[in-house]
């Protein structure tokens, strides 16, 4: 429900902000503009692919949790039979194995999310290095004004907010899509 309000406004507004900042940087110096914008297509290609795996793992986690709930429900329904046949130890071992599997899935989710953050941060911090090195060289050579370099660095810093909003929007879209598909599959 809350996501539908963002479905059109967030991508349009944040993409517009990115375009304005990017246009400003290119207007200051085309070489710095290329450096500022070069890694956004890489991020736009790589981060969603990494996020899809997290969504699949979340589905596995939900399925494993439902399996544990079913197993516990079945065990409670048959508690008298389990006690009479002395099968409680085996049931506890199977429950332990299922819980260990769930913990493994959760750990994989956290590792993937951490990897996404690391890659995203590395790709976000690479352009400032180019600004300082390439821009600094151009300033030293007198082919770029120092004020323009500072303006480009400030504009690029402002680009991180809209970009993170777009990535968060895409991640939310992926998660809501996975939840919707899960509900549809459970009904069908």
Image (cartoon, helix red, strand yellow):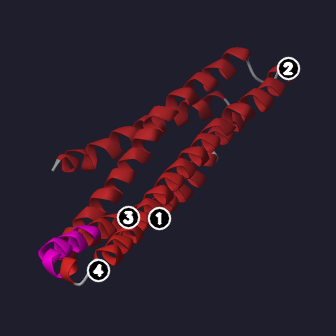
Residue 87 - label = 4
Give whichever of discs 1 and 4 has the lower sequence position.
Answer: 1
Q: Residues within 10 Å of mark 1 (few under 14, many from 20)?
A: some
Label 4, label 3: how many angstroms apart (C-alpha)? 18 Å
Which mark is in front, 1 or 4? 4
User: What segment is highlighted magenta in the picture?
Assistant: 68-81
Label 3, label 1: how many angstroms apart (C-alpha)? 21 Å
Label 2, label 1: how many angstroms apart (C-alpha)? 46 Å
Task: Answer whether labels 3 and 1 touch (C-beta < 8 Å).
Answer: no
What residue occupies the far right of the structure in this picture? 141
The answer to whether residue 41 is seen in the rendering is yes
Q: Residue, x 33% and y 51% (percent of image)?
A: 172
Residue 53 - label = 1
Q: In the image, residue 45 lies at what x, y percent? A: 54, 59
Q: In the image, residue 63 lies at what x, y percent? A: 30, 70
The kind of secondary structure element at disc 3 is helix
Residue 140 - label = 2
Q: Is residue 159 magenta?
A: no
Give whichever of discs 2 and 4 has the lower sequence position.
Answer: 4
Task: Answer whether labels 2 and 4 touch (C-beta < 8 Å).
Answer: no
Q: In the image, residue 110 lies at what x, y percent? A: 48, 52
> What residue is pinned by disc 3?
99
What residue occupies the far top of the structure in this picture? 147
Q: Residues within 10 Å of mark 3 (few under 14, many from 20)?
A: some
Label 1, label 4: how many angstroms apart (C-alpha)? 38 Å
Give whichever of discs 4 and 3 has the lower sequence position.
Answer: 4
Task: Answer whether labels 1 and 4 touch (C-beta < 8 Å).
Answer: no
The kind of secondary structure element at disc 1 is helix
Which mark is in front, 2 or 4? 4
Label 2, label 3: how many angstroms apart (C-alpha)? 61 Å
Which mark is in front, 3 or 1? 3
């Amino acid at each position: 429900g809350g996501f539908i309000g963002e479905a059109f406004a967030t991508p349009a507004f944040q993409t517009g902000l990115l375009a304005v900042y990017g246009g400003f940087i290119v207007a200051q110096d085309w070489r710095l503009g290329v450096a500022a914008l070069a890694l956004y297509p890489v991020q736009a290609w790589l981060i969603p692919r990494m996020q899809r795996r997290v969504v699949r793992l979340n589905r596995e986690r939900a399925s494993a949790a439902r399996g544990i709930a079913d197993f516990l429900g079945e065990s409670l329904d048959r508690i008298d039979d389990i006690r009479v046949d002395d099968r409680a130890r085996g049931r506890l071992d199977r429950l332990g194995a299922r819980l260990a599997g769930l913990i493994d899935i959760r750990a994989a989710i956290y590792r993937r999310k951490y990897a996404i953050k690391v890659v995203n941060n590395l790709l976000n911090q690479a352009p400032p290095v180019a600004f300082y090195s390439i821009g600094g060289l151009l300033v030293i050579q007198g082919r770029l004004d120092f004020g323009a370099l500072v303006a480009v660095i400030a504009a690029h810093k402002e680009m991180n907010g809209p970009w993170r909003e777009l990535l968060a929007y895409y991640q939310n879209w992926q998660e809501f899509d996975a939840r919707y598909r899960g509900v549809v599959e459970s009904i069908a």
